[in-house]
Amino acid sequence: MNIVRTVIKGVGGYLPTRVLTNEDLAKVVDTSDQWITERTGIKERRIAAEGELTSTMGAIAARRALDDAGVAPKDIDLIILATSTPD
């Protein structure tokens, strides 16, 4: 029997710089920070800039993970990206 071993050597992430808070939403929609927070637990969300695609953000996160691991791209077999918001 073959045993497959998987090792996570590094992780990377990326967040867009634009932040949209519940207070920001309350200025344009009839809601409040308290109402949103109580129902969703969300206090703020990040908004991608024009032209900032899921693939763009994923590529930055992947480069950061490689840097974190001290690994060259040629030395890896697989990168996994999961998203509910594709390009």
Image: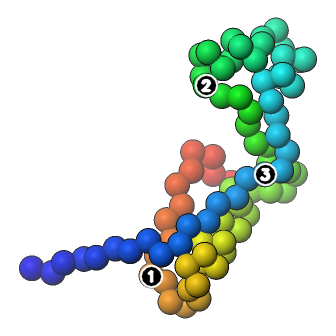
Q: Position of residue 44 (x, y in %)?
A: 74, 33
Above-or-below relation of 38 to 78: above
According to the picture, the residue beneath numbered tag 1 turns out to be 77
Upstream in sequence: badge 1 or badge 3: 3
Above-or-below relation of 8 to 13: below
Query: Label 3's element?
Result: loop
Q: Quadrant of the C terminus?
A: bottom right
User: How packed is label 2: few (under 14 Cα within 10 Å), some, or many (20 or more)?
Assistant: few
Tell me the CA gap for discs 2 and 3: 20 Å
According to the picture, the residue beneath numbered tag 2 turns out to be 41
Q: Position of residue 74 (x, y in %)?
A: 55, 90
Identity of the residue drawn at 64% across and 79% down: 67
Determine whether label 2 and label 3 are within 8 Å by CB. Answer: no
Callout 3 amino acid: Pro
Q: Position of residue 33 (x, y in %)?
A: 75, 17
Tell me the CA gap for discs 1 and 3: 27 Å
The answer to whether residue 74 is visible is yes
Q: Which mark is residue 16?
A: 3
